[in-house]
């Protein structure tokens, strides 16, 4: 009997939303999975503890800002595939910390590519590019759409995206997924979807009166993270590396998101007032949503709606979870979390 050698994958950003779903996905496919994580003073294990404790996931300490740690991780894991998900991923924060964002989101990619291809020219690399790179270009956006980034986050990601394409032109397997917003019960609470599902669950339990948000009119194409990590893997199984847009093709405003969360949780919201004075009230007239200027971005991406027809055609990828199902999933998970019936959401 010949023993099949396991494929090895290294995931940076393992403690994040996508890192945790991708690790589960690859482990289920029989991969030996290594996660690259930085040491922090708080406990970052919540999303991956179940994989780490069971021994299915091997963790390597490091930092995308620290070249020797990347070298060590690649030596130790000797990967066939690398998924570079590590990033300072908050767009709003990138205006406050532009240097750090640049150093992780662009320079980190440069460090990784240099080290990886020096180690083994055949490594297949996935780079987490983003719809934010389209910036002010109106929807729908596809692989052919012009990039017009408006934030330090998007500028760094675009520079990294171009670097990936340069390596690809030299014959390396460097793929780039231009992923539109994807969410889940594991989404960080500083992103608008999870901020809302978590806040409404707390309101439902009487633990919070109302939630404060920023721009209600921004439109996003929100999909489910579980569907999107599958696309990342599919890109690395192709004969040739390429760039793919991954999106649902459906856009909703933050206002519509709030209305959907409200109605799923049984607290329908109606709107009164205008501009910064606009409020969302429940059926008893209690203010549940108000606006605070501090949640506005210095420069906003008004509308994102992806055209993923290339991924459908070439990879056979399509999303399986609709916007309404996603909101339902996140609301139910936060209700369980806040209600104390589950310590952490493993959806
Ligand atoms: P996330 O939950 O914020 O996770 C980001 C990960 O990067 C975390 O594990 C974080 O580790 C790690 N990280 C940050 N700085 C690092 C550093 N200096 N060295 C090593 N690791 C570092 O983000 P996500 O939603 O899973 O997104 C994954 C990737 O896709 C990111 O690159 C993001 O920019 C990109 N993306 C996301 C979306 C989306 O809608 N989710 C869409 C397009 C592209 P800590 O736990 O230590 O902070
Ligand atoms: O904002 C508006 C905000 O922070 C969505 C990251 O994963 O997806 C994500 O970036 C929209 C924006 O995500 C609040 O102004 C209103 O228009 O949830 P978000 P994002 O900025 O789209 C892309 C594709 C990535 O690549 C990123 O890594 O919602 N908004 N009120 C608010 N946003 C937040 N966070 N909080 C508010 O209170």
Image (tube, rainbow, N blue to C red):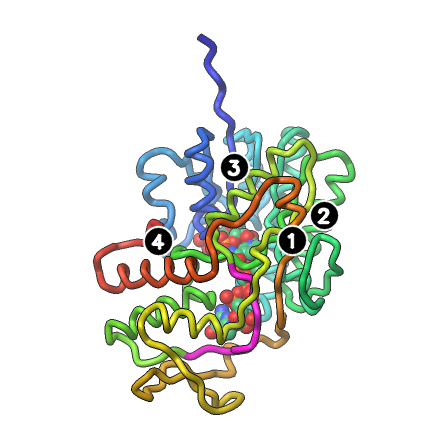
> Main structural element of the magenta stretch: helix, strand or loop?
loop
Mark 1 or mark 3, earlier in chain: 3
Q: Which residue is mark 3?
A: 10
Mark 4 element type: loop
Q: Nearer the viewer, residue 18 or 256?
A: 256
Q: Is residue 343 above or below residue 29?
A: below
Q: Secondary structure at mark 2?
A: helix
Q: Nearer the viewer, residue 62 or 47?
A: 47
Label count reads 4
**x, y percentage for residue 73?**
52, 36
Q: Secondary structure at mark 1?
A: helix
Measured Cα–Cα span from mark 4 to mark 1: 26 Å
Badge 1 is on which residue? 106
Is residue 22 shown left or right of residue 133?
left
Q: Is residue 93 visible?
A: no
Magenta region includes residue 214: yes
Q: Nearer the viewer, residue 290 or 126?
A: 290
Distance (Cα) linking label 2 and label 1: 9 Å
Q: Residues within 10 Å of mark 1 (few under 14, many from 20)?
A: many
Q: CA distance from mark 3 to mark 2?
A: 20 Å
Q: Which stretch appears magenta?
A: 212-222
Point out the tag, 3 or 4, that comes first from the N-terminus: 3
Residue under numbered circle 2: 163
Give the mark nearest the N terminus, 2 or 1.
1
Image quadrant of residue 93? bottom right
Residue that label 4 marks: 43
Which of the pair 90/241 is nearer the observer?
241
Pointer 2 with pointer 1, Cβ within 8 A: yes
Q: Residue at x 36, y 81 (%)?
A: 288
Q: Where on the picture, by quarter, is residue 30?
A: top left
């Amino acid at each position: 009997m010949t023993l099949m050698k396991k494929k090895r994958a290294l995931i940076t950003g393992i403690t994040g939303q996508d890192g945790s779903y991708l690790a589960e996905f690859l482990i289920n496919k029989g991969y030996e999975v290594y996660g690259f994580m930085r040491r922090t003073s708080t406990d970052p294990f919540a999303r991956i503890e179940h994989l780490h404790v069971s021994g299915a996931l091997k963790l390597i300490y490091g930092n995308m800002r620290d070249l020797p740690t990347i070298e060590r991780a690649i030596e130790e894991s000797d990967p066939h595939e690398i998924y570079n998900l590590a990033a300072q991923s908050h767009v709003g924060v990138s205006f406050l910390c532009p240097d750090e964002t640049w150093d992780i989101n662009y320079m980190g990619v440069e460090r990784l590519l240099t080290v990886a291809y020096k180690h083994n020219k055949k490594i297949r690399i996935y780079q987490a590019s983003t719809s934010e790179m389209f910036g002010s270009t109106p929807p729908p956006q596809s692989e052919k759409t012009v990039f017009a980034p408006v934030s330090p986050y998007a500028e760094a990601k675009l520079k990294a995206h171009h670097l990936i394409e340069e390596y690809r032109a030299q014959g390396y397997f460097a793929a780039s997924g231009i992923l539109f917003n994807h969410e889940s019960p594991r989404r960080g609470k500083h992103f608008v979807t999870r901020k809302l599902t978590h806040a409404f669950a707390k309101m439902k339990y009487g633990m919070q009166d109302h939630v404060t948000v920023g721009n209600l009119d921004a439109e996003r194409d929100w999909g489910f993270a579980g569907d999107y990590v599958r696309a990342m893997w599919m890109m690395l199984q192709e004969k040739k590396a390429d760039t793919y847009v991954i999106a649902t093709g459906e856009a909703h405003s933050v206002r519509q998101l709030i209305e959907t969360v409200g109605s799923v949780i049984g607290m329908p919201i109606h709107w009164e007032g205008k501009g910064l004075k606009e409020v969302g009230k429940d059926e008893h007239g209690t203010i549940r949503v108000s606006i605070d200027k501090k949640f506005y971005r210095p420069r906003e991406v008004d509308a994102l709606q992806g055209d993923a027809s290339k991924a459908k055609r070439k990879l056979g990828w399509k999303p399986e979870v609709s916007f309404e199902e996603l909101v339902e999933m996140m609301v139910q998970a936060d209700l369980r979390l806040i209600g104390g019936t589950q310590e952490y959401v493993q959806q």
